[in-house]
Amino acid sequence: MSSAPSLNSQDIPPGSIAVIFTAQRTDKDEAGYQSAAQRMEELAVAQPGFVAVESVRGEDGLGITVSYWKSDADAKAWRDNAEHAAIREQGRARWYSTYTLYVARVERGYQWP
Amino acid sequence: MSSAPSLNSQDIPPGSIAVIFTAQRTDKDEAGYQSAAQRMEELAVAQPGFVAVESVRGEDGLGITVSYWKSDADAKAWRDNAEHAAIREQGRARWYSTYTLYVARVERGYQWP
């Protein structure tokens, strides 16, 4: 997911919304998953209020994706995007065994160096 | 980091603090890094106000760790923990090429299934 704006290229100002998605992959349908993940990122980047996204998955299939949005209304509009919702349904049916999602408001941040 | 309380075992209530640490590893001193990462987790879990932590690192060395705290005062006390601060200095000197850290207040959450 190196094509999307990352934290190294975007400062995240206080008041921004962070959507923290932590998910355990099944071992099913890796090709379908990769294609959907790429499409999800394209959709997110094109969505109003998108700021940045970082996504990491470990060898055990646990992944964390954090997307940052200008406002809570922007984050909710992304949640309600119809194609996003359809991919989410596929995620529940095929790609994820469990996930959590937390929506949080950024209060402060640091970048090093 | 499977020994610490994870999101699957802990609900994160609104008002909790999420500390989102996104870091790019160097390729130096993997053994020292692993040892320090394990020690950091032991310290965090023992800290007042600790709720949960999830940590993932990908093959390219990018990692995301999100720790959750009962209050901002708890998160700041963890930041100011002396052994934590010493390990952080080692991280800057040896283990990380770049990192960002965002402190955010949880507004809502979802768990599936």
Image (cartoon, coloured by chain):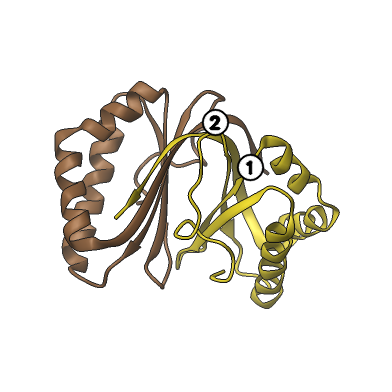
Chain colours: A brown, B yellow
Residues B84 and B2: in front is B2
Q: Chain of mark 2?
A: A
At 34% from the left and 46% from the top, the residue drawn is A3
**Measured from the top left, where is residue A10 in percent x and y?**
49, 33
Q: Residues within 10 Å of mark 1 (few under 14, many from 20)?
A: some
Q: Quadrant of the C terminus of chain A?
A: top right
Residue B70: image tag: 1
Instruction: Give the answer, above or below, for where B51 lies relative to A30.
Output: above
The total number of labels drawn is: 2
Identify the residue under disc 2: A106
SS class, disc 1:
loop
SS class, disc 2:
strand
Residues B105 and A32: in front is B105
Discs 1, 2: same chain: no
Kindly identify the amino acid type of the residue bearing the numbered disc 2: Val
At 27% from the left and 27% from the top, the residue drawn is A77
